[in-house]
Amino acid sequence: MAQAAPTTGGMARGGRTPDIFSTRTHARARVAIPVVTGLIYGYWAAANRRAGGPITGWNLLSGFISAFVFAVVLWAVMTFAPRLRRELHAAVWAAFAGIAFGFLYSSSGEAILRSIGMSLAVAAVVLILTFYRFYTHEDAAGHRIR
C-alpha cells in the first residue's frame, strides 16, 4: 500500500508562509495600525471620562490627546522594540500594555491602588505571553525565525 510523501503543510519553499501583501501595503499598515487603534483608544478614554454625561469640548480634547499619545507610543514600540533582545522586547510590550490599561482603568473613576494593581496584573500577563512568543520564535543565537 502506498503512503503519501510528507509535505510542508501548505508552506512555500524554505518553510515560510507566502507573503500575499506588497511592500507598499506593509508600509501603509505600519502607519494605519497605530492610527486606527489610537482613535479607538482615544474614544474609549473620552467615553470613560465622560461617564455617561454630555459630550463637551474638554472631553473631545482629552480623547484626541489620548489618541495621539497612544498612536505615537504604539508606533515607537512597533518600530524600535523588535530591535531589542527578547527579554527587553517583552518587557517593553508589557510596560506599554500595563500603562495603557492603567490609564483607561483609572479614568473610569476607580481607586488609584486598584488601578495600579490591575495594570500590574495586565502587564505581568502580557510579559509572560510575549516572552513565550519571542522565545519560541527565535533560534539559540537570538535571531528571529521568519
Image (cartoon, rainbow, N blue to C red):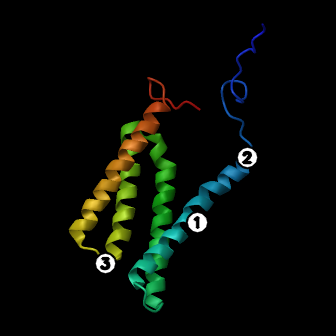
Q: Amino acid at mark 3?
A: Gly
The percent position of residue 107, horizontal first and vertical second, equals 35, 75
In the depicted structure, whether residue 40 falls above or below residue 143: below
Lower position in the chain sequence, tag 2 or tag 3 = 2
Q: Amino acid at mark 2?
A: Phe
Q: Quadrant of the C terminus?
A: top right
Residue at mark 3: 109
Residue in view at x 45 percent, y 60 percent: 73
Q: Nearer the viewer, residue 36 or 65?
A: 36
Observer able to see residue 40: yes
Q: Residues within 10 Å of mark 3 (few under 14, many from 20)?
A: few
Lower position in the chain sequence, tag 3 or tag 1 = 1
Residue 36 is marked as: 1
The percent position of residue 82, horizontal first and vertical second, equals 48, 43
Report helix, strand or loop for mark 1. helix
Report helix, strand or loop for mark 3. loop
Q: Residues within 10 Å of mark 1 (few under 14, many from 20)?
A: some
Left or right: where 9 falls relative to 111: right
The percent position of residue 86, horizontal first and vertical second, equals 41, 37
Residue at mark 2: 21
Q: Residue furthest top?
A: 1
Eye-nearest disc, 2 or 3:
3
Q: Residues within 10 Å of mark 2 (few under 14, many from 20)?
A: few
Q: Nearer the viewer, residue 144 or 104?
A: 104
Q: Residue furthest left?
A: 113
Residue in view at x 51 percent, y 51 percent: 78
